Image (cartoon, rainbow, N blue to C red):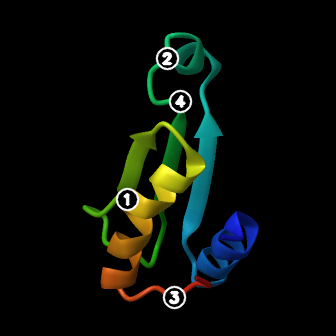
Amino acid sequence: MDVVAIMEALAEQGVTVLFKADAERMAERRNPWTFVASGAPLREDVLVRTDAASVEQCLAACLPRLRELGFSFPE
């Protein structure tokens, strides 16, 4: 899965995408990765976000929701 291509495709549709690796949570062996998608195309009350153990788990949790909301991106 090409994370950069997914982020670029979402950005082209007006979605702001953030991936974060949190050193403190990693040291504590808690879910260090965060994925957040927000922006104008999403309603004010919609924020697609998760914390997970890996980038892949973040994508597995959030990409289906973004597809449900009508966004498209590479597989």
Residue 17 lies, with reference to residue 30, above or below; the image says below
Discs 1/3, front: 1
* Alpha carbon separation for disc pair 4 and 2: 8 Å
Crowd band around label 1 with a 10 angstrom C-alpha radius: few (<14), some (14–19), many (20+): some
Report the residue at 64% width, 19% height from top.
23
Q: Which residue is mark 4?
A: 32
Q: Which residue is mark 1?
A: 61
Q: CA distance from mark 1 to mark 3?
A: 15 Å
Judged left or right of residue 47, residue 11 is right
Judging depth in this view, the residue of 17 and 72 nearest the camera is: 72
- As shown in the figure, which amino acid type bears the numbered disc 4? Pro
Q: Amino acid at mark 3?
A: Ser
Q: Is residue 36 visible?
A: no
- Residue 36 position (above or below residue 26): below
Q: Amino acid at mark 2?
A: Arg
Circles 2 and 3: CB distance less than 8 Å?
no
Mark number for residue 72? Answer: 3
Furthest-left residue in view?
A: 45
Q: CB atoms at circles 2 and 1 under 8 Å apart?
A: no
Q: Which image quarter: residue 48?
A: bottom left
Q: Position of residue 46 (x, y in %)?
A: 29, 63
User: In the rendered structure, which amino acid carries the disc numbered 1?
Assistant: Ala
Q: Earlier in the sequence, mark 4 or mark 1?
A: 4
Residue 59 lies, with reference to residue 63, above or below; the image says above
